[in-house]
């Protein structure tokens, strides 16, 4: 009994520890479930959710009296018709006419003052010239100065008030004195003609809004009396009035050289303004009243009345009755708020929780390194929440087609940011949740799953940005095939199939574009390294790689070989091959600060460690990890890439210098082992574990002058066994089976052996070959 109690206590402590460790992840999941539950319809209303042409599995009887709603499209048409039937109201105002005529008259008076001032200045200049040799010269000169100042003041006021007359040749001539180059026509008659042109169009009526914005069948024009009804085209908007006025001016002044034509056109545009003022508030209030009068129902179903019989097809009329019943049930639940409502909401939470846990349990089981980071769990929760929010808004609220929900965007975003399995599982969960929100819409779930599978396939190995066009083609093809299959199976009308295909084609084109736009933002916001970033880091023109090549060429070549080995190993076990290659490129960048202390860079045959103590040598070697991390931070390497720098050595012991120190020490036990171990941490991903093995194997094989394949196999086995025995792979999720695949064999195409054989041109020697070689010797 005590033993059993002890086991129970251990199990309880373990569960408590797990909950504490993943408290943020659990909080995010619980919050997501609760929020999504508010987007779901009630369970009772889901009972009557069907699609057009479905077969009713049971007889459906009305549980209570309810009204039959007018279909959405028909109701929208009726509302628009009601809106158009209410005339736009305009108020005709004489005040505008009088003000503009007054302003036009004042313009002519101001221009007359300019002419008079110019004439006075010219007269003063003539007098000054006449008396230039007399005693009156100074007097006439003062007159010129005063008249010039008067003209400048008048001109500044004029052009400030009438800027359209600035720097224009017709206006310069218009403002010249009448005795000189000024107008040679009757200015009073010119003013009268312009006023008459404006009056003609004011009499017709000029709207203060464009004619295209008047959507009613009629307009009502009020002049402090009973409004006069007419067609919108009975009056003019401002642009049309200007155009007609220009034609009238042309008739008044038929000569093209007549300066009054251009002047009159400009004055009409400046002074002829709308005199029919739109009463927006009154119009919109009356339109709202008209829309309120539009009937929302077109009949009633009595309690106990049969809606559809068992095995009957769901027609359009039957579907509208069922939708009306669903809405009535939802409204009844909101009003009553009974115990049944509480139970229904609890059922919603449980149902959503089942679907959400389906995805996150997969994440916790098979992608634990992602689940361990609460930020990434939050990101996945946000993606799911946004998708369901769009489904609720676009389909439930706005009544749009379900195929505008961008499930493919979520699938591609999760695939690029994480991997293909997460992308597929996430898209599956989103499709299931969206289908439930829309009332068990199985058609949508099928089409979305097939489309999302195609989306995941098209970006599962992202290597070029040009794959966006491939994704568009693949998505378009998959969507069209899926919706056509569903349509043919359920005998949908061809116009309906065509409409669904068009929606899906639009989403197929937009989804990759939206995805590529989001990836950059999410990478920065959540510190995620995608294959697009890794591709940029793999470019040999990257400043850090160029510097490594120039300052530590031996290390650079070593990193390239390790990259080839690591990529082959990753392909063997299904790990991220591109991440392995890029991690290998940067894992030894710290060596470039002291390249001469590492054997791959010692080309002169001189080893600087010969003059150093083992402890100092070990310190220099260990420091390449610290130096590498500093360089990674300086050049802004992503964390996933920087992790390869300390983890490719873990906390292994630097064996050569450790044993050398023990040999030189008086008492070998006095040698402190920690001084000869790397700082760690140990590899914690499959990719960093691969680099640890590949880096050690490359260095070991390179130390042999003529390695054969059997010796290489033995080297690999010993290196893997040594790291397992030292506990370096304890935190790494590599299995023994995967370690075998990493090793490879001579007949495989992936793993270490095939690549090493190709790099060092190792020929496989069988026993017969050895015997023949011996005989020939």
Image: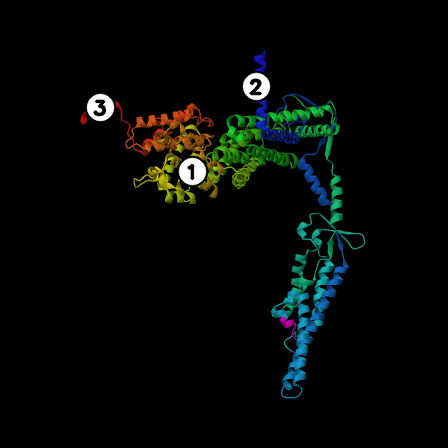
Residue visible at 68% across and 73% down?
114
Q: CA distance from mark 1 to mark 2?
A: 43 Å
Residue 607 in sight here? yes
Q: Nearer the viewer, mark 3 or mark 2?
A: 2
Mark 1: few/some/many CA within 10 Å (<14, 14-19, 20+): some
Q: Are marks 3 and 1 in contact (CB under 8 Å)?
A: no
Q: Earlier in the sequence, mark 3 or mark 2?
A: 2
Of circles 3 and 1, the one toward us is 1
Mark drawn on residue 313? none
294 on left or right of 547: right
Locate residue 201, reporting x and y percent: 71, 60
Q: Earlier in the sequence, mark 1 or mark 2?
A: 2
Classify 10 Å Cα crowding around label 3: few (below 14), some (14-19), many (20 and above): few
* Badge number at residue 771: 3
Indicate the secondary structure of the residue bearing disc 3: helix
Residue nearest the viewer, comparing 271 with 426: 426
Q: For the residues marked 3 and 1, what is the alpha-carbon distance in whole angstroms?
A: 49 Å
Q: Which residues are magenta?
A: 172-179
> Which of labels 1 and 2 is toward the front?
1
Q: Quadrant of the N terminus?
A: top right
Q: Secondary structure at mark 1?
A: helix
Residue position marked by numbered label 1 in the rendering: 623
Q: Which residue is mark 2?
A: 10
């Amino acid at each position: 009994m005590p033993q059993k109690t002890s086991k129970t206590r251990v199990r309880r402590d373990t569960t408590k520890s797990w909950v504490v460790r993943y408290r943020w992840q659990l909080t995010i999941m619980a919050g997501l479930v609760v929020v999504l539950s508010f987007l779901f319809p009630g369970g009772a209303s889901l009972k009557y959710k069907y699609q057009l042409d479905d077969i009713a599995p049971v007889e459906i009887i009305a549980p209570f009296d309810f009204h039959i709603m007018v279909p959405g499209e028909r109701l929208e048409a009726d509302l628009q018709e009601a809106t158009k039937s209410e005339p736009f109201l305009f108020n005709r105002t004489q005040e505008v006419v009088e003000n503009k005529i007054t302003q036009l008259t004042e313009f002519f008076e101001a221009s007359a003052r300019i002419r008079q001032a110019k004439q006075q200045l010219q007269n003063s200049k003539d007098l000054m010239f006449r008396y230039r040799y007399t005693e009156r010269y100074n007097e006439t000169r003062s007159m010129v100065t005063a008249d010039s100042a008067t003209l400048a003041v008048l001109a500044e006021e004029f052009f400030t008030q009438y800027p359209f007359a600035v720097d224009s040749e017709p206006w310069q001539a218009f403002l010249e004195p009448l005795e000189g180059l000024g107008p040679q026509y009757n200015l009073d008659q010119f003013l009268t003609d312009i006023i008459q042109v404006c009056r003609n169009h004011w009499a017709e009526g000029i709207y203060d809004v464009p004619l295209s914005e008047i959507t009613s069948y009629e307009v009502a024009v009020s002049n402090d009396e009973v409004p006069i009804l007419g067609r919108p085209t009975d009056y003019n908007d401002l642009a049309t009035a200007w155009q007609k006025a220009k034609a009238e001016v042309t008739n008044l002044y038929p000569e093209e050289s007549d300066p009054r034509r251009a002047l009159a056109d400009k004055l009409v545009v400046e002074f002829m303004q709308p005199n029919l003022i739109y009463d927006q508030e009154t119009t919109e209030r009356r339109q709202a009243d008209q829309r309120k009068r539009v009937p929302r129902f077109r009949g009633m179903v009595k309690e106990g009345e049969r809606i559809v019989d068992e095995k009957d097809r769901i027609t359009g009329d039957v579907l509208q009755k069922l939708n009306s019943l669903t809405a009535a049930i939802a409204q009844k639940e909101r009003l009553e708020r009974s115990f049944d409502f509480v139970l229904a909401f609890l059922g919603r939470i449980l149902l959503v929780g089942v679907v959400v846990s389906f995805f996150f349990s997969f994440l916790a089981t098979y992608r634990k390194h992602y689940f361990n980071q609460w930020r990434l769990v939050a990101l996945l929760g946000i993606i799911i929440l946004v998708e369901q929010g769009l489904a609720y808004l676009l389909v439930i609220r706005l009544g749009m087609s379900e195929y505008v929900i961008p499930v493919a965007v979520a699938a591609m975003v999760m695939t690029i940011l994480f991997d293909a399995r997460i992308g597929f599982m996430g898209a599956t969960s989103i499709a299931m949740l969206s289908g439930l929100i829309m009332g068990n819409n199985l058609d949508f779930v099928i089409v979305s799953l097939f489309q999302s599978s195609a989306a995941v396939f098209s970006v599962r190995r992202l290597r070029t940005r040009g794959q966006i066009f491939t994704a568009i083609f693949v998505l378009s093809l998959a969507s069209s095939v899926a919706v056509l299959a569903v349509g043919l199976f359920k005998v949908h009308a061809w116009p309906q199939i065509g409409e669904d295909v068009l929606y899906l084609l639009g989403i197929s084109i937009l989804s990759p574009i939206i995805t590529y736009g989001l990836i950059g933002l999410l990478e920065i916001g959540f510190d995620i390294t995608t294959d697009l970033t890794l591709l940029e880091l793999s470019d040999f023109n990257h400043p850090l790689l160029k510097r490594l090549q120039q300052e530590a060429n031996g290390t650079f070549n070593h990193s390239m070989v390790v990259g080839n080995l690591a990529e082959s190993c990753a392909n063997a076990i299904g790990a991220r091959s591109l991440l392995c290659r890029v991690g290998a490129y940067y894992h030894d960048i710290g060596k470039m600060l002291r390249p001469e202390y590492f054997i791959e860079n010692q080309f002169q045959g001189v080893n600087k460690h010969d003059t150093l103590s083992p402890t100092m040598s070990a310190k220099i070697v260990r420091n390449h990890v610290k130096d590498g991390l500093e360089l990674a931070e300086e050049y802004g390497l992503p964390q996933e890439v920087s992790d390869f720098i300390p983890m490719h050595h873990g906390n292994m012991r630097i064996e050569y210098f450790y044993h050398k120190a023990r040999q030189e020490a008086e008492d070998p036990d006095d040698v402190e082992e920690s001084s000869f171990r790397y700082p760690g941490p140990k590899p914690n991903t499959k990719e960093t574990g691969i680099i640890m093995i590949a880096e050690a194997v490359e260095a070991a094989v390179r130390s042999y002058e003529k390695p054969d394949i059997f010796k290489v196999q033995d080297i690999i086995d010993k290196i893997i066994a040594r790291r397992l025995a030292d506990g370096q792979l304890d935190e790494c999720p590599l299995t023994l089976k995967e370690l075998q695949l990493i090793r490879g064999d001579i007949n495989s195409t992936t793993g270490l052996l095939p690549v090493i054989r190709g790099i060092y041109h190792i020929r496989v020697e069988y026993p017969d070959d050895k015997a023949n070689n011996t005989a020939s010797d």
